[in-house]
Amino acid sequence: MSDVRLNSSNVLSQSQVKFGTSGARGLVTDFSSDVCAAFTAAFIKVMQQGFDFDTIALAIDNRPSSQAMAQASAAVAKKMGFDVVYYGVIPTPALAYVAMQQNIPSIMITGSHIPFDRNGIKFYRPDGEISKQDEQSILQIDASYEPVTDLPQLTVDPTAAKKYIERYASLYQGKPLSGKHIGIYEHSSAGRDLYPEIFTKLGAQVTSLERSNTFVPIDTEAVSEEDKQKACNWSKEYGFDAIFSTDGDGDRPLVADENGEWLRGDILGLLCADALNIESLAVPVSCNTAIELSNKFIHVARTKIGSPYVIAEFASLNNDYKSSAGFEANGGFLLGSDIDVDGYLLKALPTRDAVLPFVAVLLAAKETGISAMLEQLPNRETSSDRIQNFATEKSLSIIAQGTKNPQQLIDKLGFCNLEVQSIDTTDGLRILLSNGDLIHLRPSGNAPELRCYAEASSHETAQTYVQQALTHIKMLD
């Protein structure tokens, strides 16, 4: 054993890596072996305060930097006396699911959708995602560990991939997706090797599309014009009933209907929750108000943006309702309670998952098509976009000024003909206009970006709000 010891709080306080809305995020160059080891040592130490375990589960996405980060995490865990089971490249929910069944903590090396020069680490307790309180404990705890000098070879255990496939392939009787043709936009998704098997076992015909050997940072909340056109072209060429894709780590779905139109994540979540007969929902404040207007749920709780806040709400919901779930505007369905699906007990999975909402909605739309289901919802359209490489400090300054004088901000953004009715500062600045439309500004928790969300009675109007707001923000001093 080396005489040299490092202290996690010292290493992390000097690091540029920070916790965002979901996990620790930063530049690849900031995720040194020491930083990865410090996060891992601190996480293990925090978990030991509430759980007994001797094994850590580990998995990665397809980013080139993820392998070395996983090796550093595995190295320090082994030095601390823990076994490490490495599940290789799999979706984040697959790792979380199998680790929860085994009652052990887990670590996912992924930057999700953020740009190629960045990466991240997500942490899971034996009972689900870590909380915001856990995040602070990880940063503050004094975990002593040996520095990582050699990166161990990691051997892939296929168990998690198999268990995740079984979770959904065995969910429904027979082959309920028989006759359906699904396109899978694979790009560099961590789940691209699993999805064809799941959908095929459920009876669907599957066509794989555009597998990439380089990492593609798909953002399900800001779908590119190129990807919008791809979906339309694929739909016309193949006659798909739906197109399925995800972000980089496979916890956020990107779904297109039979016309090749991508669905917003919150609308997909609404349709899924309805199909599963969920009683109560926890959703971030940025989600579409069609959720409440649809009158499909007994109770809807609004939270700050980020899955930890949604998950924290489940404890309250499960005291008062038979079933609970949540989702976000960027997609990903969180099952907060066990539910009965076609006579099968589907265990709770309180972390974002991409597969359940797709399968549930496609089955619900089996006779009509997904587009017909969309037409039955309240007419509330949303749009969102972002300014990349926009200093967080500048975003916060704009929001502070807008909170103090929202009408002045709206005027500066070129909406002089609109009046502010009220504001909501649950997360960022959400402005309700007198005409019932919404404009919401919020700095990203994962990268130096300013996001703008808008809601109106037409997509064109919502899109105009977003484009005009962001254009004017770029011109602000």
Image (cartoon, helix red, strand yellow):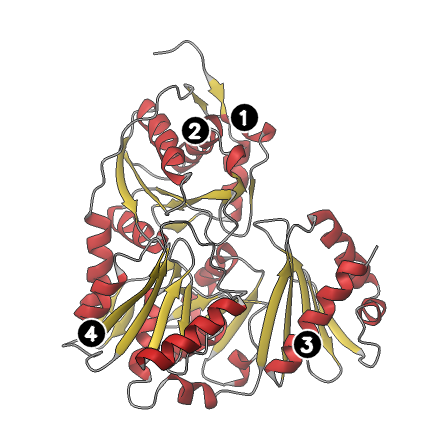
Mark 1 and mark 2: Cα distance apart in space: 9 Å
Decide if residue 123 is in sight here: yes
Circles 1 and 3, Cβ within 8 Å, touching? The answer is no
Q: Would you name the residue on which mark 3 appears?
A: 464
- Name the front one of labels 3 and 2: 3
Q: Could you tell me which secondary element the residue under label 3 belongs to?
A: helix
What's the residue type where badge 2 is placed? Ala
Mark 4 and mark 2: Cα distance apart in space: 42 Å
Mark 3 and mark 2: Cα distance apart in space: 46 Å
Q: Could you tell me which secondary element the residue under label 1 belongs to?
A: helix
Quarter of the image for residue 322 reads bottom left
Mark 1 and mark 4: Cα distance apart in space: 48 Å
Q: Is residue 213 above or below residue 293?
A: above
Nearer-N-terminus badge (3/2): 2
Q: Residue at x 25, y 74 (%)?
A: 341
Residue 37 image label: 2
- Name the front one of labels 4 and 3: 3
Nearer-N-terminus badge (4/2): 2
Q: Residues within 10 Å of mark 1 (few under 14, many from 20)?
A: some
Q: Could you tell me which secondary element the residue under label 2 belongs to?
A: helix
Circles 3 and 2, Cβ within 8 Å, touching? The answer is no
Circles 1 and 2, Cβ within 8 Å, touching? The answer is yes
Q: Quarter of the image containing the N terminus? A: top left
Q: Would you name the residue on which mark 1 appears?
A: 11
Q: Position of residue 441 (x, y in %)?
A: 68, 63
For this orientation, the residue located farthest to the top is 3
Q: Quarter of the image containing the C terminus? A: bottom right
Q: Position of residue 94 (x, y in %)?
A: 30, 54
Q: Residues within 10 Å of mark 4 (few under 14, many from 20)?
A: some
